[in-house]
Amino acid sequence: MREIILIQVSGNDRPGLTAAFTRILARYHLNILDIGQAVIHDTLSLGILVEVPPGADASSMLKDLLFEAHKRDTSVRFRPIDEDRYEQWVSGQGKDRHIITLLSRKITAEQLGDVTTVVAENNLNIDSIARLSGRVRLEGEHGDPDARACVEISVRGEPRDTAAMRAAFLGIANDRNLDIAFQRDNAFRRNRRLVVFDMDSTLIRSEVIDELAAEAGVAEQVSAITERAMRGELDFNESFRARVALLKGLDESALERVRDRIELTEGARRLVSTLKALGYRTAILSGGFTWFGHWLQGLLGIDYVYANELKIEDGRVTGEVAEPIVNGDRKAELLREIAAREGIDMEQVIAVGDGANDLPMLGAAGLGIAFRAKPLVKKNAEHSISTLGLDGILYLIGVRDKDQQELLK
């Protein structure tokens, strides 16, 4: 009779270990139905599901495997699999797959325990767990403020209640200082091609209009309007015109002084350079000013820039801005235009922003990410990153730290 056997090998990893066991299987002309291998801290775990055809000497094959395991100081276990159970397993391959990505400065047992509990409560089966971040060094007394940690969990099935599961993940994220992304694992996820960014408080740390207001001596007035607009309490166009009007008479040299003190957001340079190496197109869609957007374009190598044109006459800011204003709806419209121009499906687009005026483009993109966002934006965006820098986005598209290192050599 035909037999199906699961072979499980574990022990200290060394070159030739997998070859030694598979050579034995080859001598008996077995069919490999499934295989998986993982190495954690130089300890190997190898699983092979084999079909033993009628007439094959399964008993001798198992003895040979046991002898090889003893010789190599490893452990080998066998488990027969019922054919009906195997066919049930095969029929499950049509189930939807999802990726759950955990991002933080460090991954703790509490974080992983909470997340996997929610996974189990939603009847999702975990197929694999992989670390995308580099190997973690032992921390000093105060930890490493620049550390990055990411674990990717592949699950199969449909959640019992997707909305409730996302709410549970959000609660865990808030309680455990963790970011959790839940994405359908499909061809689009693995083939994104365009990333569009907000500029102020996303690619750069500051809000440029507030910096210009400080130069003009109207910081408090502009800051108050900015905060209300970013929280979605004011119409963006009117609030923007009101803030720009307060800059009237500002000397053009103030723009250069502001530029000189701008700091890039953590991970921005690493993210954009990696995206470029992978062949992605990039764009800035900003409610800020083109003067700074074009400077940033040259600095990072961004492909497209759309922002607001600050009118300057005789070396001074006029207090007016060219129409149309790049507001939330305009950002979403521009995103679609760029995608169409590049021949890119909207599911292959990533949009990143922090303010209420970014929500339309976050919703239009296949992957919308609220980055260190205001509470209103974080609540309404499908995905968010708050614990890591911008380069944490690379984990959401499955790029490992070692992949980045190879690309940027």
Image (cartoon, rainbow, N blue to C red):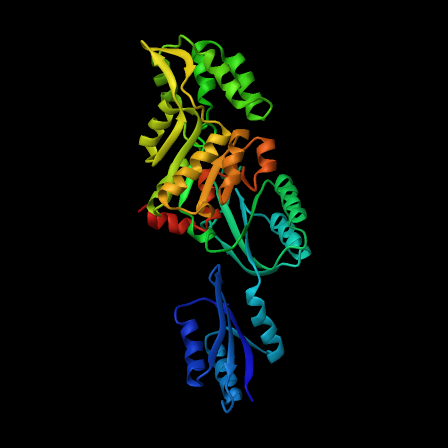
In this image, 217 relative to 341: left or right? right
**Camera-side residue of 141 and 147:** 147
Q: Is residue 175 above or below residue 252?
A: below
Q: Position of residue 273 (x, y in %)?
A: 35, 41
In this image, 330 relative to 168: left or right? left
Q: Position of residue 404 (x, y in %)?
A: 38, 48
Q: Is residue 99 above or below residue 255?
A: below
Q: Quadrant of residue 302?
A: top left
Residue drawn at x 67%, y 51% is 161
**Camera-side residue of 120 and 388:** 120
In this image, 311 relative to 32: left or right? left
Q: Position of residue 156 (x, y in %)?
A: 58, 60
Report how many numbered discs are placed on residues in the image: 0
Q: Position of residue 330 (x, y in %)?
A: 46, 30
Residue drawn at x 50%, y 88% is 60
**Camera-side residue of 300 and 242:** 242
Q: Is residue 237 above or below residue 157?
A: above
Q: Quadrant of residue 301?
A: top left
